[in-house]
Amino acid sequence: GVFICDLTGHGVRAALVTAMIRAMSEALTQLAHDPGMFLRKLNADLCSILKSTGSPMLTTAFYLVADWQTGVLRFANAGHPKPLLAHRADNRIELLLNASGKSQPALGLFDNPPYETTEMKIAPGDFVMLFTDGLYEVQDEQHELYTQAMLVADVAKRAQLPASELFDELIERMQRFSADGKFSDDVCMVGIE
């Protein structure tokens, strides 16, 4: 299983909420096999804590479980950027979309959102790339944004590379695209081969 999340803001409050999410997610091992239930329980726990503070904190999250023996990938998304699945055998990139096609809300905002578990088949050699939105929220000198479509195209060009090389090249690509050579938000990338 792989869990990634991203909180708005920086500083002490964001660090505390991050630590709480980490502790809560580690306590949910009994639900680890079902991503939708995992996010529902995590959301309920986070909502109860954040309601007492009187101010929500936008927290996106994505959780997946990959079974390499059966070739089944199960995932759920709570408002997080859609990860990419690179089918290396036929050089095809696919967004990991919920089965319903509807986006689900971020964590901690609503009491009982219907986070759903979606299943899909994976094949030997496939590569899953999870990331935070800081990766592609970059502007060039003309104030044009680096888009998700551009990210998909850039990953497709490099899909045959090992994850570490692909990530290094993507970071360099974004820095060249950026007007100041920097990212305006923090960046996290996780790859599963």
Image: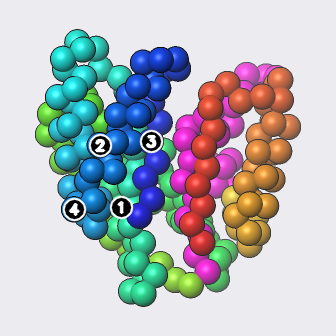
Q: Which residues are magenta?
A: 125-153
Q: Mark 1–mark 4 contact, CB under 8 Å? A: no
Callout 2 amino acid: Met
Q: Position of residue 178 (x, y in %)?
A: 79, 30
For mark 2, give the secondary structure.
helix
Disc 2: CA contacts within 10 A as few (<14), some (14-19) or many (>=20): some
Of callouts 2 and 4, the N-terminal one: 2
Inspect the image, locate mark 1, and give the three-letter code of the amino acid beneath it.
Phe
Residue at 60% in and 61% down = 191
Q: Is residue 91 left or right of residue 190?
A: right
Residue beneath label 4, please?
30
Examine the rendering and report whether any part of residue 18 can be seen: yes
CA neighbours of label 3 inside 10 A, class few (<14), some (14 to 19), many (20+): many
Residue at image position (30%, 36%) is 107
- The quadrant of the image that shows the C terminus is bottom right
Secondary-structure class at tag 4:
helix
Residue 192: x and y in percent read 57, 66
Q: Is residue 130 magenta?
A: yes
Q: Closer to the N terminus: mark 2 or mark 1?
A: 2
SS for callout 3: strand
Report the disc number at residue 75: 1
Q: Are marks 2 and 1 in contact (CB under 8 Å)?
A: no
**Coloring applied to the structure:** rainbow
- State the CA–CA distance, disc 1 to disc 4: 16 Å
Vertical order, 129 against 68 (above or below): above
Is there a contact, CB below 8 Å, between mark 2 and mark 3?
no
Question: Looking at the picture, does residue 183 appear above or below residue 148?
Answer: above
Crowding at label 1, few (<14), some or many (≥20) Cα neighbours within 10 Å? many
Q: Identity of the amino acid at label 4?
A: Gln
How crowded is the residue under tag 4: few (<14 C-alpha within 10 Å), some, or many (20+)? few
Give how far apart the Cα atoms at labels 3 and 4 are. 20 Å
Give the residue pinned by disc 2.
Answer: 24
